[in-house]
Amino acid sequence: LFSGPVDFLRSSPQLQFLPDPDVPEIAFCGRSNVGKSSLLNALTGRRAIARASVTPGRTQELNFFDVGRPEKEGALPLFRLVDMPGYGFAKAPVKVVEKWKALVNSYLRGRAVLVRTLVLVDSRHGVKEVDRAMMKMLDEAAVGYRVVLTKTDKIKASELDKVAEATAAEIRKHVAAYPELHLTSSEKGMGIDTLRAAVVSDALG
Ligand code: GTP
Ligand code: MG
């Protein structure tokens, strides 16, 4: 499915500019620099459809990507992936951070077509307070999510085991029906096929 066309649809710096809520959406959230844009690229098999960067705070709007563009002119795509600004970014001005936070939170709370959120956690750092707050907010908004450990190529297998275990325990503590955990490396491709299949089933199932 993802081997079909993926198109950049639009960038929404404000809530009133969202696309019409006409197809299912899967959103990517997590701390700044955790690897959201890179994961979106890896899942779609596109090198740089979403812009990734070493500088935290790269993504500053909600970016919508159409997956499965129909052949018929004007027909709807199968679903959309939504790349979002990161949270917990201390270097941006407070006002800017507040603006991103309000945008992300109101999107996550109020978007009727949002079928699943991916909560990304850097495997080197594990779950942080801001991640707990995000999961709690999603729980309260009744938005289902998957937790994705990123950049697993950067740590040793033994450390990855430990962080995966700690993350699984963390998830169980904070969520009623606890979500699935995925171990991924966008750089090396680890876990990408499995996550892609899960995302497709979330979107179309
Ligand atoms: P913001 O948009 O700023 O919130 O960041 P982001 O979460 O979109 O992160 P992005 O995808 O831009 O990646 C941040 C940095 O981490 C980039 O330098 C990426 O190349 C790097 N990175 C992302 N995923 C991986 C991975 O799986 N392995 C390694 N080694 N580096 C990665
Ligand atoms: Mg980004």
Image: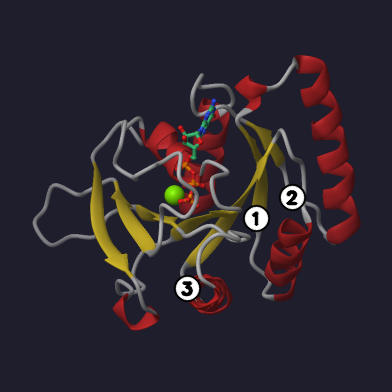
Scheme of image coloration: secondary structure
From this view, report whether residue 118 is shown above or below residue 149.
below
Disc 1 marks a residue whose amino acid type is: Tyr
Relative image position of residue 22 (x, y in whole percent): 33, 70
Q: For the residue labelled by badge 2, is the local secondary structure a helix, a strand or a loop?
A: loop
Task: Give me the residue at 82% from left, 50% from top.
Answer: 171
- Residue corresponding to mark 3: 96
- Residue corresponding to mark 2: 179
Task: Give me the residue at 52% from left, 44% from top.
Answer: 199
Q: Nearer the viewer, mark 1 or mark 3?
A: 3
On screen, residue 145 versus residue 1, left or right, reads right
Q: In the depicted view, which residue is nearer to us: 194 or 149?
A: 149
Relative image position of residue 109 (x, y in whole percent): 58, 76
Disc 2 marks a residue whose amino acid type is: Pro
Q: For the residue labelled by badge 3, is the local secondary structure a helix, a strand or a loop?
A: helix
Task: Give me the residue at 11% from left, 53% from top.
Answer: 72
Residue neighbourhood size for the residue with mark 1, other residues' Cα within 10 Å, grouped as few (<14), some (14–19), many (≥20): many
First of labels 3, 2 by sequence position: 3
Q: Which mark is residue 22?
A: none
The furthest residue to the left: 73
Residues under labels 1 and 3: Cα distance?
A: 26 Å
Determine whether label 1 and label 3 are within 8 Å by CB: no
Task: Give me the residue at 18% from left, 60% from top.
Answer: 75
Determine whether label 2 and label 1 are within 8 Å by CB: yes
- Residue corresponding to mark 1: 145
From this view, report whether residue 204 is shown above or below residue 35.
below
Q: For the residue labelled by badge 1, is the local secondary structure a helix, a strand or a loop?
A: strand
